[in-house]
Image (cartoon, rainbow, N blue to C red):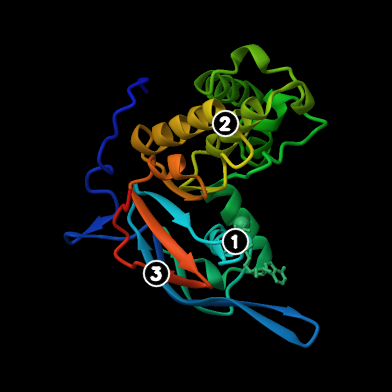
Amino acid sequence: MTASPTRAPPPEGAGEAGGAIRPIVAIAHLSKSYRRGDQVVPVLRDITLDIPPGDFIALMGPSGSGKSTLLNLIAGIDKPDAGELRVDGEDITRLAEAELADWRAAHVGFVFQFYNLMPVLDAFENVELPLLLTSLGKRDRRERVETALALVGLSDRMDHYPNELSGGQQQRVAIARAFITDPTIIVADEPTGDLDRKSAEDILGLLRRLNSEMGKTVIMVTHDRHAVESARHVTHLEKGELVAGDGEKVT
Ligand SMILES: Nc1ncnc2c1ncn2[C@@H]1O[C@H](COP(=O)(O)OP(=O)(O)OP(=O)(O)O)[C@@H](O)[C@H]1O
Ligand SMILES: [Mg+2]
């Protein structure tokens, strides 16, 4: 992997079958409500959206419009009430809770606004954590973790605990943790929301590299206009519905 900031097109032929490119995320007529006692709060209404493999999509919209809810459904953290949701061909709405947990571990890398690192583990151990669920041996794990931390520029901070790292550094650890298992998709919920401009640029640069150089599909919720410039497409949610449906970049 080079340090070139240029963006490559999505990997050629990715997901291709008989000429048509299969979306990596295929959502049709998806709905979700939350129940609080006997009250039903509709959150997502009839969402239909295809995300092609190798895309970098920014999901925008006002607070409360359902962005995190949609991201959590795509990532298998939560389940829809109705509709179809396939990720890399797998209908994840049909998986039982334990199967879904295994599926998530193998296919999804997560980046959150507040990093969500384990405070009792150092940077190395935080990045290694998802690999403990795999069959990789200790030496292979060490090699992978060291490579990942080098890639995010933290070779000299491997034994630092989260409270000994800046916000930007913690988010770089979180990025390394997100791609260490070579997931199918990376989901990021306001990954730059708590960072200064410079740290935010570092994080966006890393997400762009994961997308353009490693071919990862990135789905990012953001309020940040600078962050949107890193995306290939922008989609807007308003009150639980997708608006401006063509998905073309609006910046
Ligand atoms: N567990 C829950 N129980 C009940 N209502 C919920 C729950 N989680 C979210 N909601 C409601 O769903 C709606 C959408 O929430 P969501 O977190 O998806 O919004 P968002 O677009 O990510 O907003 P923000 O930009 O503020 O993060 C909100 O009105 C919220 O109150
Ligand atoms: Mg949110």
**SS type, badge 3:** strand
**SS type, badge 2:** helix
Which residue position is annotated with label 3?
243
Q: Are the residues at dot 3 and dot 2 in contact (C-beta closer than 8 Å)?
A: no
**SS type, badge 1:** loop
Camera-side residue: 230 or 120?
230
Q: Residue furthest top?
A: 156
- Residue 176: assigned label: 2
Residue at x 41%, y 42% (from the top left corner): 216
- Residue 151: assigned label: none
**Is 128 situated above or below 63?**
above
- Count how many numbered circles sit on residues in the image: 3
Q: Is mark 1 within 8 Å of ligand 1?
A: yes
Coordinates of residue 44 in the picture (x, y in percent): 54, 74
Q: Are the residues at dot 1 and dot 3 in contact (C-beta closer than 8 Å)?
A: no
Camera-side residue: 106 or 166?
166
Q: Quadrant of the N terminus?
A: top left
Q: Amino acid at mark 2?
A: Ala
